[in-house]
Image: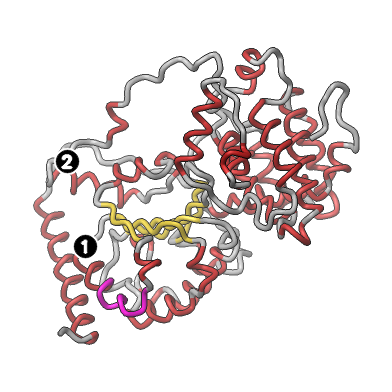
Amino acid sequence: MTSTSELEQLAEIELQKEEEEEEEEDQMCVTDAPSAQPRSSSFSPDPSHPYYDVARHGIIQVSGDDNYGRKLIIFSSCCLPPSHQLNHQRLLEYLKFTLDQYVEMDYILVYFHYGLRSSNKPSLKWLREAYNEFDRKYKKNLKTLYVVHPTNFIRIVWNIFKPLISHKFGKKLTYVNYLGELRDHLNYEQLIIPPDVLRHDEKLRAAQKVGPPPSVKTPPPRPPLPTQQFGVSLQYIREKNREAIIPPVIQQTVVYLKEKGLRTEGIFRRSARVQLIKDVRKLYNLGKPVNFDQYGDIHVPAVILKTFLRELPEPLFTFRVYNQVQEILHVESSLRVTRCKQIIESLPEHNFIVVKYLLCFLHMVSQESIVNKMSPSNLACVFGVNLVWPRHGSISLTALMPINIFTELLIEHFHTVFGSRCPPGQVTP
């Protein structure tokens, strides 16, 4: 039986061998084929960030939500600088600092392995300490760990850690050989993928004669059904639903949750069974009635509400205000609520009415936070990225903070921002 120390030596040898093979391939590979285009992340951490020394490398990124409302957190090995330039204890603290904002919710980890070298890899001792420090609160709500471009080194390290890892946690690990495979699980376009990883994936596919990602051959989208609710604009929904001011999905989920979910601990933090969400989306898109009672899970309507908002072609807060939201941190604290009011009042009338309806409900949820544990801050972490995002590119970890602060202020100071009464003719949630 191979000892742990022998496995560690084997892992080191395997990593060095993989590096040498990559260097040989790079020297032999001369091609005129266009390289992958860098994926923009708009990453520029503020020097005042408590972990700026680590954050500036872009190793850890939060990349919005997956298709079912679970937060996506990315770790990119290729962004690790040489070990002598990075305090790995600080890296661990920064990872925990990032996860602490989301571990009360269901979340997904995507680990891009390409780029790990003998010169930049943390020690196996560090990995053990890291795993031991991540107690149950971090492991419980992790739904899947995607390891992208795994190598023999990864498999050897996994064997080293097997005695420490529970069977339940082990089932969360998913190996992904090519980036295209992530499309089956995540919103691929939302991922922040380092250019080096994109180029490596191209080389792997070329070497194995694997075709391009499926999206290259995706047929043009079919026109939406007249009853379509998901993935179409507010205007389209209003025109097709007899001038309904509040989209049916928002109104029906809010009414149901107001009646039965306000005191549910962790409401909006949990995911629901993927197949149930698909079934409900299909019913809505076909114009069929939805009875949430039959699913026996209060988190189904909660996820449906987030999914609807996330799939709007333009965010509810509109693209136009994204930069204004990003600047909220530059506004003096005492003036931020007034600035939020100005931004919200600049929205188109229909958006304003729908935003007010939704935020009135979220304010109600926050009023029960002693029971449901969903403070304005917690709700903002869940809803912020579903209400505003940039027209191009993904939301970086740095961009999340102003989005969350803006959303938190709207929820906490709802009556100041919107006024205590709804517009004439609007149904109060």
Q: Where is residue 411 in the image (x, y as percent from the top left)?
A: 77, 47
Q: What element carries label 2?
A: loop
SS category of the residue bearing label 1 = loop
The image quadrant that residue 352 belongs to is: top right
Left or right placement of residue 356 versus residue 1 in this view = right
Residue at image x 55%, y 69%? 137
Image marks 1 and 2: residues in contact by CB distance under 8 Å? no
Look at the image and say whether residue 135 sits in the magenta stretch: no
Answer with the quarter of the image where residue 388 lies.
Answer: top right
In the rendered image, residue 163 lying in the magenta stretch gets the answer yes
Q: Give the range drawn in magenta.
A: 158-165
Residue in the image at 47% along x and 47% along y: 41
Near mark 1 (Cα within 10 A), the count class, few <14, some 14-19 or many ≥20, is some
Q: Which mark is residue 210?
A: 2
The disc label shown at residue 151, or none: 1
Q: In this view, does 97 lie to the left or right of 129?
A: right
Q: Image point 55% across, 63% down: which residue?
A: 98
- Compare residues 234 and 192 and report the one nearer the observer: 234
User: Earlier along the polypeptide chain: callout 1 or callout 2?
Assistant: 1
Residue 103 at x, y = what percent? 56, 62
Q: Which amino acid does label 1 sit on?
A: Thr
- In the image, residue 70 sits, relative to residue 81, either above or below, namely above
